[in-house]
Image (spheres, rainbow, N blue to C red):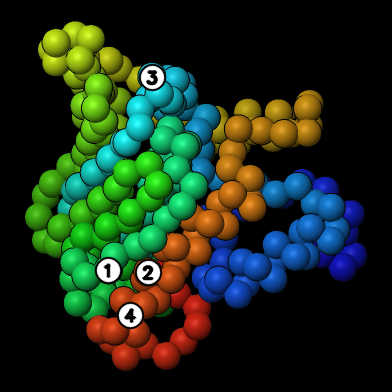
Amino acid sequence: MENTSIKNYILEKVVFQSVEDLYEMKKEFDERGVKVWVNCPRRNMDFYKKLKEILQKEDSINYLIEGSDWGMGCNSIHLLDIYAFFSGASEFSADIERLDAGHISSKRSGYFEFTGQLDIDTNKGQVTMRSVKDRDINLIAVITSNHYQIFVDESRGKAWIHSVESDWDFKETEFDVLYVSQTTKMNVEAILDRGDCELTPYNESLKYHEVLLDAFLNHLKKTDDYRESACPIT
């Protein structure tokens, strides 16, 4: 950054592997007046924008994500981010007691993955992430509140919405899962046109990164006697 005058960045997750680096770079970005977003592109999808609209008056919203070997370490930031988006949650604390002991190797050399269950309590409800080892279970998400139960299967681009209003009968809906090539183009154009985009601002995403990095690091230190300050997830 010393020899550049770049004013806008879109960062890929996981943006940094330690909480110390997260805050050091926050200070750097703030001092330089740089605008930074994190590339969690579900916020670009019309389906999740609609969910945000219909759930905005719900007092409590729970989010369950379950599947087999879906890369909890690598991908949990996307799921916590979209939960915060449609629920409005702003406070988070993680419970690592149900994670499987130790870690498994990531598809990328030198990086770790995790299985088992990670529970995150928030001021709007609970997020439960389950990754099951050595089974063939499609990743499914279930969103529940007082007035809604919503099943989401992104791999099929379908959701089933049950509501009090419909007497709990379900309504099936289809939606487009956007490719990164599509969302990157729309976000870059939005930044160039109006100086902002729909992605998560860095200072907001920092909170989601921090709770997840702390959770996985604490798990590694507890079960693997891990001594490093950086969490090897990508």
Q: CA distance from mark 2 to mark 4?
A: 9 Å
Contact (Cβ within 8 Å) of mark 3 with mark 4 = no
| Residue 194 visible from this viewpoint | yes
Using the image, tell me which numbered label, if any, was put on residue 168.
Answer: none
Q: Which residue is mark 3?
A: 54
Label 3 vs 4, first from the N-terminus: 3
Using the image, tell me which numbered label, if any, was put on residue 96.
Answer: 1
Q: Which residue is mark 2?
A: 215
Label 1 vs 3, first from the N-terminus: 3
Asked where in the image residue 175 lies, by quadrant, the reply is: top left
* Amino acid type, callout 1: Ile
What element does badge 1 sit on?
loop
* Amino acid type, callout 3: Ile
- In the image, residue 183 lies at what x, y percent? 56, 32
- In the image, residue 97 lies at what x, y percent? 22, 70
What element does badge 2 sit on?
helix
